[in-house]
Image (tube, rainbow, N blue to C red):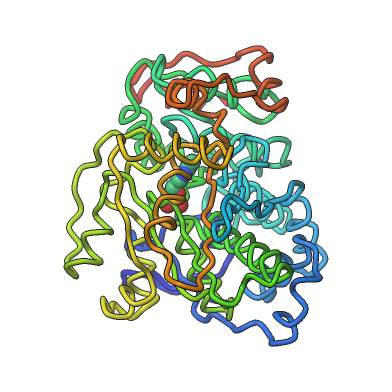
Amino acid sequence: MKYYSTNRKAPLADLRKAVVKGLAEDRGLYMPERIEQLPKAFFDNIQDMPFQDIAYNVAANFFGEDVDPDALQDIVYDTLSFDCPVVKVTDNIYTLELFHGPTLAFKDVGARFMARLLGYFLRQGAGAVCGEAAATNGTVNVLVATSGDTGSAVANGFLGVEGIHVYVLYPKGKVSPIQECQFTTLGQNITAIEVDGVFDDCQALVKSAFMDEELNRHMMLTSANSINVARFLPQAFYYFNAYARMKAMGKADQLVMCVPSGNFGNICAALFGREMGLPIKRFIAANNANDVFYNYLQTGQYEPRPSVQTLANAMDVGDPSNFARIYTLYGQSHEHISQLISGATYQDEQIRETMRQCYNETGYTLDPHGACGFRALQEGLHEGEVGVFCETAHPAKFKEKVDDILNTDIDIPARLKAFMEGEKQSVPMSRDFADFKRYLMQR
Ligand SMILES: *Cc1c(COP(=O)(O)O)cnc(C)c1O
C-alpha cells in the first residue's frame, strides 16, 4: 500500500517511510491510497469473534501488504493486551470504555501499535529510510514533547521495545503529579527530560533537534506524533469491537457513534472504519468550548482559532490536524461531511452538570471528556437509534476535578497507583537548544 499526502505535493510513501517519518515532506498528513471493504462474511460473524481477531482482520486490511502476517498478528495481539468493553449507561446509550490500557486513556492503543510496528521495521533495517543516519548505531530515538497525556501514552507504548529509545520532554512544574509519574518512573529505554520552561519550549527543542543536521548525522531521530498513520489507523480496531458487542445484543441496527474530539484522530479512525464497511449509521463529534469543527459543520467555513482552556483539556485544540484527513476522505464536500457527522459543543458548566446528572441518575462516573460524548447522545439521538460514546480516559486521571464536581472520593486503579509509588527519575534541562544538543551528542 502506498500513502499520499493530504497536500498532494510530496511523493508517495510506502508504509515504512510513512511510519518512520510521520509527516510528509510537504507537511501534509499521510493517507492510504485505497481503503478496501472487508468481506460480508466478516460482518456476518463479527459478533462471535474476540476483539483481537477482529482487530487483526482490520489491521491486515491496511497493513497486510507491508507486514508479514505472523508478525502483524503478534503486533496486534501484543498491542491489545487489554479489553475495550462496551458498558450500558442508559436504555439507549452505551459507553465504549477505552481506558483499560496501561495509562488509562485511548491513546495507549495507537502508541502501543506504533511502537511495535516501528520495532518491526527496525529489525528489517529501517535505517535506509533515514538516509545518512543509517551510519549510527541502529537505535531509533523518539523525541516527544508533552503537556501531560501524550508523553505517558508514548513512553508506556514504547517501554521495553528493542532498538528504540524515547526522550519525553515536559515542562517543569506544569504537569500534574499523576501525569508526571507515568513517564518519569519507567526507566529502561525511557528518559524523562524536565525542561525549565513551558510546553512551547519543549516543542521548540524537539523541532530544533529534527532540523539540526549534525545531530541527525549523529543519531536517528523520529517523532511519535498522533498524526502518524501507525498511531491513528489502529484506533479503528475498537469501533469494530463496539459494533460486534452491540450486534451480539441485537442493538446495532441504527448505531450512532459519538466521539469526544480534539485533534480529530480518534473520530477519523472511526470514519475509516465505516469506509471499510462498518455499519455505523452516523457520527457525532462532541467538542468542549473549542468549537472550530462544530462551526465548520454549521457554516462550511473552516476557521482555526487559538485554543481555550477547558475542563476537558485533552480536547483543547483550536486547529485540529486531522481535519485535513476528513476533508480529503470525503472529497472536500461539506455536504457529505455534514450529512454523516453532526456536532455538539459544551461549556465547562454544562460538562459539570452532565457529570453530576449522569452520576446521580445512573451511577456511572464520567470523566470530563466522556461527559461531552454522553450529553451529545442524550440531546442528539433520534427515535430508534442506539448511541455509543467513547470514554476516552478513566475518571481517576482527573481525580481532583471529578471528586470536586461529584463530591466523591473515587478509587485510583491499581496500575495508576503503581506508577505513583515508583521513583521519579528525570534529567534537568534548560530551554536553550545548545544544552539539549550537547546532551544528545553525548548519547
Ligand atoms: C487525546 C484525547 C482526546 C481527543 O482525541 P483526538 O483524537 O485528538 O480527537 C479526548 N479525550 C482524551 C482523554 C484524550 O486524551
- Horizontal and vertical percent for residue 415? 71, 28
Any part of residue 143 in sight: no
- Is residue 49 or residue 175 the one in the foreground? 49
Q: Which quadrant does the C terminus fall into?
A: top right
- Horizontal and vertical percent for residue 142? 54, 40
Q: Is residue 132 left or right of residue 334?
A: right
- Is residue 434 or residue 143 the one in the foreground? 143
Q: Is residue 212 left or right of residue 162?
A: left
Number of disc labels:
0
Q: Is residue 441 left or right of residue 237?
A: left
316 is higher (above) or lower (below) than 417: below
- Is residue 173 or residue 275 the one in the foreground? 275
144 is higher (above) or lower (below) than 249: above
Q: Residue at x 25, y 66 (%)?
A: 297
- Horizontal and vertical percent for residue 176? 46, 20
Q: Residue at x 54, y 46 (%)?
A: 391
Q: Which quadrant does the N terminus fall into?
A: bottom right
Any part of residue 188 in sight: yes
